Image (tube, rainbow, N blue to C red):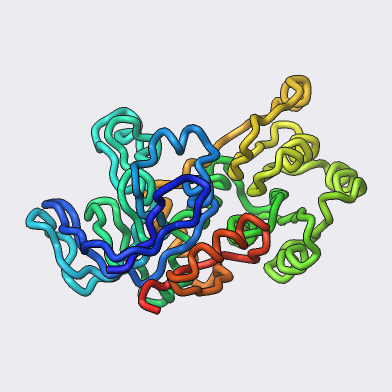
Amino acid sequence: MQAAVLAEYGRPLLLENVSVPEPLVDEVLIEVLACGVCHSDLHIADGDLPGFRALTKQRVIPGHEVVGRVVRCGAGVTDLRAGDRIGVPWLYRACGGCEQCLEGNENLCRQSAAVTGMTVDGGYAQFMCANARYVVRIPDGLRDEEAAPLLCAGVTSYRALRKANVVAGQRVAVFGIGGLGHLAVQLARAMGAEVLALDLSEDKLALARELGASHAWNAADPEALKSLRKRGGVHAAVVTSAANAAYEAAVKVLRPNGTLCVVGLPTEPLKFHALALVSAEAHIVGSAVGTREDLRAVLELAAKGLVRCRVEVSPLSRVNDVLDAMRRGAIHGRMVLDPRR
């Protein structure tokens, strides 16, 4: 089969012919129908985040937003069968028995968790294996390419909003209207919130308005933050941008008792004045992708038509062009690879 292999950090992925993997007893072999290209894939390929670099296995096949069809099941798999269409997310497997797993936070498992496309091979390939317990079924009404990015970008944005306890009538600011941000806008709207969007791109701001944002400002305009503060600040600020400046701005527009949602991953440490957090009794929450429960919730919203991912599909052979475009910030919405092309 053809696969894109990370052989050296910061270098193009290698398109190689490799053996089709054999599923273990608790795994299924799937034909990959679509695989989203996530910014985390770029961090893995470039090796610019020490935490990722320490975990990435040698000669890994990236890709963790995978929609595929079951080809063959391992001997211990009873809940799936050939022909089922499933999603394979970032969390390849967890231990199921540690405190985090038992508390319903399997995405925070530190015992024997594995990450698709980083510690085990992922979906930049024609076939891959998946742990049968940690996959989710894809609703019939969702196309492969639209469902794939929901398995990371969608669920990460959803969990951020859920952890911020967003409810109808609240104000939510989304900083960065890219692959995650345009989904965060829709998810916040689905929760009944008023959405306020900030980005440097006028095209992305226009997209935010189209998706239901009540206001959209250029983040470089000093009047933008003043406007947010005049409205009383925001209950939640979801930062999907990887720019430190976005986080600095987000802290300034929180209302008292507001929540900063950390989603985007700058390569440099975040810096805040403690007084800004203390004086507002502000909260900071991270969003580490999500659980299977979160995944099912996002897919259900999408199946109802409340969330739709803007996607562009590319053949697997163009994966390096896609990653280069992502480095330049030239992608609107989400890119998806089709290994069958």
Count numbered badges in the picture. Answer: 0
254 up-or-down from 223: above or below? above
Q: Residue 232 placed where, x, y %?
A: 83, 42
The residue lying furthest to the left in this view is: 75
Name the side, left or right, on which 304 lies relative to 217: left
Q: Quadrant of residue 325?
A: bottom right
**Nearest the camera: 35 or 298?**
35
Who's the residue at 38% across and 72% down the image? Answer: 339
- In the picture, which quadrant includes the C terminus? bottom left
Q: Nearer the viewer, residue 282 or 86?
A: 86
Q: Is residue 313 above or below residue 102?
A: below
Residue extending farthest right: 223
- Where's residue 55, x and y in %? 38, 36
From this view, report whether residue 129 is shown above or below residue 54. below
Question: Image quadrant for the N terminus?
Answer: bottom left
Vertical order, 86 against 174 (above or below): below
- Towards the viewer: 38 or 15: 15
Can residue 293 be seen by looking at this rendering? no
In the picture provided, is 26 more to the left or to the right than 331?
left
Residue 32 found in image quarter: bottom left
Q: Position of residue 337 (x, y in %)?
A: 45, 69
User: Residue 106 occupies which quadrant of the picture?
Assistant: top left
Q: Residue drawn at (31%, 42%), measured in percent from left and top?
A: 114
Relative image position of residue 92 (x, y in whole percent) = 31, 48
Image point (66%, 37%), residue name? 260
From where the camera sits, is residue 294 visible?
yes
At x 34%, y 63%, the residue is: 16
